[in-house]
Every structure is written in C-alpha cells, then in structure tokens.
C-alpha cells in the first residue's frame, strides 16, 4: 500500500462485479467476454486516452492467429475474430506473408482499430474510464477488492467482486501483494523498441531491389562499418494498409529498466534518436525510400516484458517445445520463441526457436491465475511464464485469448461462487468453445494469401 494515501478519506466512486485494469488487446477482450451474457456489471479502466495498448500505441500487425511455416493453420478464433472482422468490413486489414519468421500476420490500420475498440466496448455496455491510473490496492475483506485510482477528477476508489490485471506491468498484482519475477533479474530482459512509420515509399522499387534481403544486407554493412550509428544489423520494415507507407521494428533499446521512470525516460529519448538515424539511413541507402519521411512514432516505447506474475502454473520453455496440449488448456499458441536480446559475439540479434511436430502447444489455465488468488486473474504480457516461454506466448492473438479466458473465468467464478484457483476448468473450456475458441489443432490448412481472412475465416 502507498502510505501517503489515506484510503479512508478517498471517496468510493462505484462498485462493480468485474473490474478490468488496462485496456490493451487483452483487457479489451476480457471486458467484452465478461459482458457477453449482460449478466454482470463490468468496468474497464485505462491510463491512456484511447484503448488498444500495444495494438494501437505501437504496432499494426496481429501475430499468433496462424502457425508459421509452409503448412500454416489458423489456431486462434473466438472474440478475437470479431475484432479482425470489424476491420475487414472497412478494408482495413490484409494478411502479410511470413517474411520475418513469426508466421502470417494480420496487418491493420491502428487508427481504425482505436475506433473499433471504442465501439465494441460501448456496444457491450462496459463502463469505461480513460486517462485513469491505478495507484493503490486496499485490502478491505475477503470477498471484494478495492482499488484506488487517480485521474483529472482526483483520487477515488472502485470496489469490485473480481479483478482482471491486464495492465502489462502487473500493477494490480504488484500493489496487491502477489508474487512476481522482474524481467532481467535472472536473464537479460528483451529489448525495448520505438516503432516508426514512413510515408511516400516506392514499394515497387523497394521490392525490385531485393526487399527484405537487400535491406538487411545494407543494415549489416552500415552497422559493421559504422557508417550509420544503427543499433542493430537486422530489422523489419513492412507495408501498411495505408498506401505507400511502411512500419518498422528496427529501433533497439536495451539495458534499461522500464519500471524505473528515470531509465524509462532515457529509453524514450534514445528510441526517438535511433528512429531518425534510421530515417537518414533509409533515405540514403535503401532504394524506394529516397523521398520518404517519418510520419509517426509509437505513442510510447514498446516494452516487451517487465513483471511476470507467479501463477498457479508457470509456462516454461519445455512446455512450448513439447508441442503438447494439456487437458487444462484454455487457448493454443504456435508462435516460435522470439527473443529480442543483446547480441553476443556475432550471434543473431533475435533468437528464434520453433515449435516442433505440429507446431502448436496448449496454454494451461493456471498461467492466468496469480498463485493462491481468490478473486483475481492476469491477462497479457504479465501472465505466468518464464523468460523463454514468454518470448513465444506474448503475441497479440494469444494475449487476446488470455483476455477472453480471464473474462469468462471471472463470470463463471461469480456464477459458481468459486475462487479463481479452484475454478472448474472444464466448465470454462466449454464456455470458450461455445464462443468459437479452438482447443484442438484444426485439420485444415489456412489460406494465407492477402485476402485469405475474408475468404476462409470470417465468422458469419
């Protein structure tokens, strides 16, 4: 508890059945899932001025819907499909082929996605507060959790029967006394990235000159000769929904702690500096970029991992590489271990390790339940996993799946008057499957052509 806040003097603003903290893709899906039956009141609280988190702040591609490789399968469905379907209705998606190793991505317009999240949340009747930050968790009994927030209206409390921590940094679990690991304590944390977008790119000229392979050869040469102060010798630049525009994952900021505000400040400044070094490099060295300019930076630097909660089960590397689906699985993952780390002695800057056999594993329910939790779940990148497993299971299709599972678990726990850690997982699995969630590997291959989503996977 933060000692300088006298929580007895903080007014109680409202009470709710289910409180979701953080409106990233995981939190939004958690809130939407919890409201599907319209049986329980749901509040969703977000510190920024728009929903979506990573999906709208810094990225423009959903990964994890498809397995990588030459025989891709679509392994994530359910409520996550409805979000992509909304974007598809207005022509704001296309399937991007497996050009960087993680499998086919669903490229989308992040500005349109903000509006889709807004509308879905509103239509579901979720009580939504933006510009609102969690500052404390108060223990006031075994049956409810009381959270203290701050926004422009001042300090206030929200009391909830169930809480889903989708804050990314596990802020609720940290303030509520749950145990966790901080990334970087036992092995290097994954690097942070400021994404940037460039307009007026001649993509035909870029492709004719060799596309990705050509770009990476030039990056490697610039890095090794020092002709440009690039932070890495490989990266990605891919086409966007907007004509003549590209988005990048090229900036690399390591060895700074995103939970320390002074270090996070330095990371933000360094990320922006690197972005404009890349702009200079692209314009002068990469065919097709001669007339291009940066038109936008990510809303904040992209943070891959900070706190990882210790759950009733902790996903580990062996779980991923086993390619097995445990009986208590709540969603599937086929994403490789993709570890963006500090390079050593010539090794690749991004470490890849693919899932063998059918290329898919199941993620147990216990990974979204903090150890011993009665009333709380986690969803998103703060879920219970080791560093290696986290590097596989952090794709947004998987974090949306976590959110849907957590939202339905919260409603089921209210229905059955059960705690989070004693919940009947078979009943949760039944609820998930009723909404279209896949808990078995589908036998059919996916169409991952540019319009493959519309042709094969659209839910009518």
Image (tube, rainbow, N blue to C red):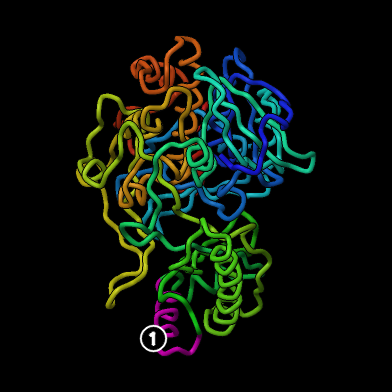
Please provide percent x and percent y for residue 132: 69, 41
User: What residue do we see at 42% from left, 22% from top?
Assistant: 420
In the image: residue 360, left or right of residue 10: left
User: What residue do we see at 59% from left, 21% from top?
Assistant: 35
| Closer to us: 143 or 387 | 143
Location of residue 150 (image quadrant): top right
Circle 1 sits on which residue? 224
In the image: residue 359, left or right of residue 171: left
- Residue 446 appears in view: no
Is residue 220 a member of the stretch shown in magenta? yes
Is residue 151 a member of the stretch shown in magenta? no
Helix, strand or loop at mark 1: helix
Please provide percent x and percent y for residue 453: 49, 39
Please provide percent x and percent y for residue 167: 54, 42
Quick check: 347 above or below 93?
A: below
Please provide percent x and percent y for residue 267: 55, 67
User: What residue do we see at 50% from left, 47% from top?
Assistant: 169
Q: Which residues are magenta?
A: 213-228
């Amino acid at each position: 508890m933060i000692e300088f806040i006298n929580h007895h003097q903080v007014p109680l603003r409202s009470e709710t059945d289910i409180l979701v903290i953080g409106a990233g893709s995981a939190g939004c899906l958690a809130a939407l899932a919890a409201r599907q039956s319209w049986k329980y009141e749901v509040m969703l609280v977000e510190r920024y001025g728009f929903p979506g988190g990573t999906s709208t702040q810094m990225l423009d591609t959903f990964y994890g819907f498809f397995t990588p490789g030459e025989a891709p399968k679509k392994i994530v469905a359910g409520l996550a499909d409805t979000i992509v379907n909304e974007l598809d209705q207005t022509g704001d998606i296309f399937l991007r082929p497996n050009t960087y190793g993680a499998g086919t991505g669903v490229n989308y317009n992040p500005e349109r996605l903000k509006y889709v999240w807004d509308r879905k949340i509103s239509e579901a009747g979720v009580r939504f507060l933006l510009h609102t930050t969690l500052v404390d968790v108060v223990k006031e009994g075994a049956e409810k959790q009381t959270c203290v927030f701050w926004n422009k209206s001042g300090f206030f409390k929200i009391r909830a029967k169930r809480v889903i921590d989708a804050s990314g940094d596990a802020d609720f679990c940290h303030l509520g006394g749950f145990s966790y690991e901080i990334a970087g304590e036992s092995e290097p944390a994954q690097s942070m990235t400021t994404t940037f977008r460039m307009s007026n790119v001649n993509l035909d000229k870029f492709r004719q000159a060799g596309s990705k392979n050509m770009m990476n050869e030039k990056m490697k040469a610039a890095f090794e000769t020092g002709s440009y102060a690039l932070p890495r010798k490989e990266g990605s630049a891919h086409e966007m929904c907007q004509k003549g525009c590209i988005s990048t994952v090229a900036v690399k900021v390591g060895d700074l702690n995103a939970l320390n505000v002074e270090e996070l400040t330095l990371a933000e400044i360094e990320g922006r500096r690197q972005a404009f070094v890349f702009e200079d490099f692209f314009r002068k060295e990469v065919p097709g970029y001669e007339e291009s300019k940066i038109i936008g930076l990510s809303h904040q630097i992209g943070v891959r991992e900070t706190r990882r909660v210790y759950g009733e089960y902790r996903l580990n590397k062996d779980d991923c590489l086993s390619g097995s689906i445990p009986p208590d699985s709540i969603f599937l993952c086929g994403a490789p271990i993709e570890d963006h780390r500090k390079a050593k002695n010539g090794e690749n800057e991004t470490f890849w390790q693919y899932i063998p056999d059918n290329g898919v594993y199941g993620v147990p329910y216990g990974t979204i339940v903090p150890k011993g939790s009665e009333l709380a779940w986690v969803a998103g990148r703060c879920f219970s996993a080791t560093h290696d497993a986290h590097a596989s299971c952090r794709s947004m299709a998987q974090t949306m799946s976590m959110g849907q599972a957590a939202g339905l678990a919260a409603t089921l726990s209210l229905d059955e008057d059960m705690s989070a850690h004693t919940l009947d997982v078979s009943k949760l699995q039944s609820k998930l499957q009723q909404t279209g969630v896949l808990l078995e590997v589908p036998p059919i291959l996916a169409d991952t052509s540019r319009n493959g989503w519309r042709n094969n996977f659209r839910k009518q």
